[in-house]
Image (cartoon, rainbow, N blue to C red):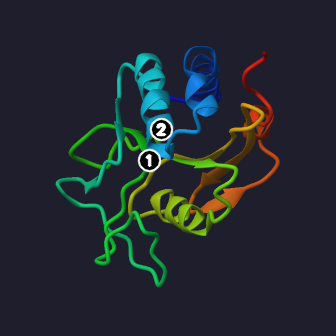
Amino acid sequence: MNEQDLYENVKAALQLFFLKDCALLELTVNECSISHKLAEHLQYLFKEYEVDCEYNRHGIYPKRIHRDHRTDAEGSDGRVFPDIVIHKRGHDERNLLAIEIKKRDNTDVSGDVEKLEVLTGQEFGYKTGLLIIFDVQNKILSDVVFFQDGGERENTAWDNLRGIGHAG
């Protein structure tokens, strides 16, 4: 799948989320609930892939990264649980997208940034990573940070997703 198709499918899934599931933002639910519903919309659009939440496997082994700081959601042994991944299970040959979800009021994104840098690097080989930040109060995306080849990329088409959301 090329980057333009990936972008269009993610954009469509986000639009579906705001259309059908905006009530989750109004209820200020946990980020896991937001991730789950977004993953459902992604699965509809990425039929040739599996879309999983909190998927903790690297091939058949636990997904681990080695670094000094770990978020509360990660194990002390380096296990990580990406919020959403789009991939083929059991191997790393078709790791398409890793997504981390944050609500704007949760300002510590350093663990998510580090995780996406590693997941889009050589070891795990996810083609793309996204940090998606929801502004719950205004019911829009306040930021979308794009990762590729182990680093954050600026001034990309993904920046155009900022500000999309519920229109009413």
Residue 17 at x, y = what percent? 57, 22
User: In this view of the protein, which residue sits in the foreground, 111 or 67?
Assistant: 111
Q: Which residue is depicted at the point 59% across and 63% down?
A: 113
* 109 sits left or right of 43 in the view: right
Q: Which residue is depicted at the point 44% across and 47% down?
A: 83
Residue that protrudes farthest toward the left in the picture: 60
Query: In this rendering, is residue 103 above or below 34?
Result: below
The residue wearing badge 1 is 83
Q: Quadrant of the C terminus?
A: top right
Q: Helix, strand or loop at disc 2?
A: helix
Q: Which mark is residue 35?
A: 2
User: In this view of the protein, which residue sits in the foreground, 111 or 136?
Assistant: 136
Q: Are marks 2 and 1 in contact (CB under 8 Å)?
A: yes
Residue that protrudes farthest toward the bottom in the picture: 68
Query: In this rendering, is residue 36 above or below 8?
Result: below
Residue 30 at x, y = what percent? 49, 44
Q: Helix, strand or loop at disc 1?
A: loop
Amino acid type assigned to the residue bearing label 2 in the image: Ser
Mark 1 closeness class: few <14, some 14–19, many ≥20 residues within 10 Å: many
Task: Pick whichever of labels 2 and 1 is earlier in the sequence.
Answer: 2
Q: Quadrant of residue 36?
A: top left
Mark 2 closeness class: few <14, some 14–19, many ≥20 residues within 10 Å: some
Q: Which residue is depicted at the point 68% across and 53% down?
A: 105
